[in-house]
Image: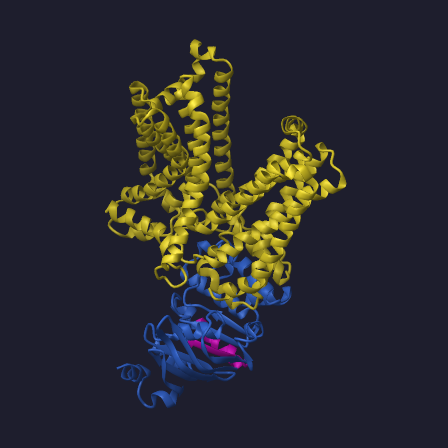
Chain colours: A blue, B yellow
Amino acid sequence: MLRIEHLSKTYENKKAVNDLSLHIAPKEIYGFIGHNGAGKTTTLKSVVGILEFEQGEIFIHGHSIKKEPLICKNEIAYIPDNPDLYEFMTGMQYLNFVADIFKVGIEERKVRIQKYAEILELSAALNDSISSYSHGMKQKLTIISAWIHEPKLIIMDEPFVGLDPKASHLLKEMMKEFCHQGGAIFFSTHVLEVAEKLCDKIAIIKNGNLIVSGTMEEVKGDASLEEVFLELEE
Amino acid sequence: MLRLLVKKQLMEINASFFINKKNGKKKSKTSTILSIVGFGMVMIGILGGIFTGLSNLLCVPFCSLGLDWLYFVYMALIAIVLGIFGSVFNTYASLYQAKDNEMLMVFPIPARTILCSRLVSVYLMGLMYSGVVFIPAILIHAIHYGISLGPIVMLVNISLIVFVLSCVLGYGVAQIAAHTKNRSAIKVLASLGFIAAYYYVYFKAVNSMEEILSNPELLAKGVQGIVPLIIFGKAGTGDIGSMCIVTMLSMGLTILSYLILEHNFFTLVQKSKIRVVSTKKVKNTVQKSVSQALLTKEFGRFTSSANYMLNCGLGSLVLVILGIVFLFKGQYAMEILKEVFKMENIESLAFIASTCMAIGMIDITAPSISLEGKNIWILKSLPVDTWQVLLAKLKVQWYVSGIPFFFAWICFLFVAKLNVFMMGMTLLIPVAFIVVNSCVGLVINLIKPNLTWVDEINVIKQSLGVLFTMLINVIFILVMAGLYFIIGYQFSVIYLLIWMIFFIGLSIGLFVWLKNKGVRCFEQL
């Protein structure tokens, strides 16, 4: 589903990501962890085509994000770490905007918006201006917009930040359901307990370099993920 | 504390000149020098030059007749007009809607200190624009009649008057916005109402001055209506009594304005943050194409911001007014033009120049990339062709300029008896100019974007891109009209044809640039 090959990205003279390679298969929830400034967001933004990179390749469903960005973007959805949305729109207008871009039919979008808005308890606020939303509500709206076109791959940057415990739980359920239906998720998080319980595979990045990756068992063995992470960070 | 906040305000302005927004580093020396030279060219070279010329034209004739005061009143009124235009629309945004208001209020800073720091930039903006008019007036007067204190005091008073008027509008808009639902529309209407009222007073004053010039005995009779103007003008001549009255009045009004603003600054900041909930009714959803969706989004952005509409779309209203003026006064104006200039097709040139000037006031594309701000990730992560994104931004400007222009053109055709060729020219040149104008704004903004603004007014009004776009437009129109009077009138048909070909060629060139390099620029943001 997602193949990252020898990805390198440099900001001025600082190497943000160095020769990173990962492979995420369908039905996998892949966690991406690392300290602040390790290169997680840079990697995720490169995957979704927001950031250009100088070396390496990223393939989504066999298509290069560099050479065929539109085909790739049609297959994916992105949830950023900070949900900066168009504040001049209402929640519903934003969802319709995204649905129009992805050419989702009226009936399909109605069903999906209703379904996910009900799950995330945002139905009542959808006709309000986004400028009146709290951080968590914006995050929920971004999540609904990510699910609206039924992508094959969802990229999430710190998706649980700002969500209340119930919404976090619901999102985890949505993620599991999505992967159960054949989708793949690649997400970054600082919440190691969540990663440990949710992820099929995990990658740890430090100063732009991939330290370890593999299934949860391969990475942590008998120890807790926190112990392994702290040990690797030292 | 105040110094610290003012420093922060100035740092933001400074950053627009000296910091590269893409990487947060200092600009190269060349780039910095170019920015300063460009800004200097607009403010001192073009605007300063125009008003130096005007001062030179008026100073000696007025002063030699003993009407020094009238010279100062005349220049002061123009200075106030420009000062108002420069600062009036951004007062509300600067005071009540700055993104960092909330952050600053968390700190142990008194609300009045935050207010004062904001007012400093409002004052400086008004001073800069009014100074561009009045400093040349002072200099020309000093060259002919020596340096005196009066004109300098008058400049201070003018800047205070501009400041008071800006505060009055800012406060009025904040009050209205705090109690209404459709805030953008109300803000636009309130601002336009204020401007209309202001221009009414301005034209009344100008009429009074014209009356004085044509009937000097009015002065001797001391007609009551002109007494305030005389006192105001005499303050510029150094008359101690007038200076004291005007200074006391302007200072008094300034203090009063400050006290009113301070009284409920905190409350109004809070109210401007509280958003109206459930304002929009759910309509039947219609599936849109990608280009329609992008266009709707761009129109939504434009109409959601009173600042954006007022600063970048006011020309559309001017076009409508021009159309009405053509309809009712066009015949009379054309007769005068033909009588005075005795040039072939002068009425067509006048129509083209005036509509192009109004079209040049519409610069929606000039801040449109910067306005994406932190939302830029949305367009970049969605499967849309970047060219479609840029095209949607261009189209908004085409509609906002094109529809009122078409109205003005139809009105003009009613009164002007043109042959088919001239009908075509009067349509095609401004239409091609609409395309050029929109492309120039977008090109400059793609080259010099600012995605990290704190207050949207920084990119809508105070950015170099907007200034350069307006400068380029003014140059085009001045060159087109100037060359016509020098040489073009001798072969007016061919002359206008050349301009049409030039604008069409330029718009094609800019289109090609946008489709290739422009798309790359956007993708690299």
Res. B175 in view: no
Magenta: predominant secondary structure element? Answer: helix
Q: Is residue A51 visible?
A: yes
- Residue B390 percent across, percent down from the top left: 56, 59
Q: Which residues are magenta?
A: A170-187
Q: Residue at coordinates 31% horizontally, 42% vertically from top-left? A: B115
* Magenta span includes A177: yes
Q: Quadrant of residue B259?
A: top left
Please determine whether, in this image, residue A209 is positioned above or below residue B193: below
Q: How many marks?
A: 0
- Percent across and percent down for residue A171 are 45, 72
Report the residue that reaches farthest toward the right: B420
Viewer-closest of B68 and A31:
B68
Give the side of residue A12 with respect to residue A152, left or right.
left
Image location of residue B516, percent across then percent down: 57, 64
Question: x and y percent of residue B362 in the render?
Answer: 55, 45
Residue situated in front as seen by the camera: B472 or B199: B472
- Was residue B279 drawn as part of the magenta stretch in this picture? no
Q: Nearer the viewer, residue B188 or A49?
A: A49
At 56% from the left and 54% from the top, the residue drawn is B439
> Viewed as shown, does residue B404 lie left or right of B220?
right
Note whether A123 is above or below B132 in the view shown. Answer: below
Q: Report the residue at 38% width, 41% height from top.
A: B125
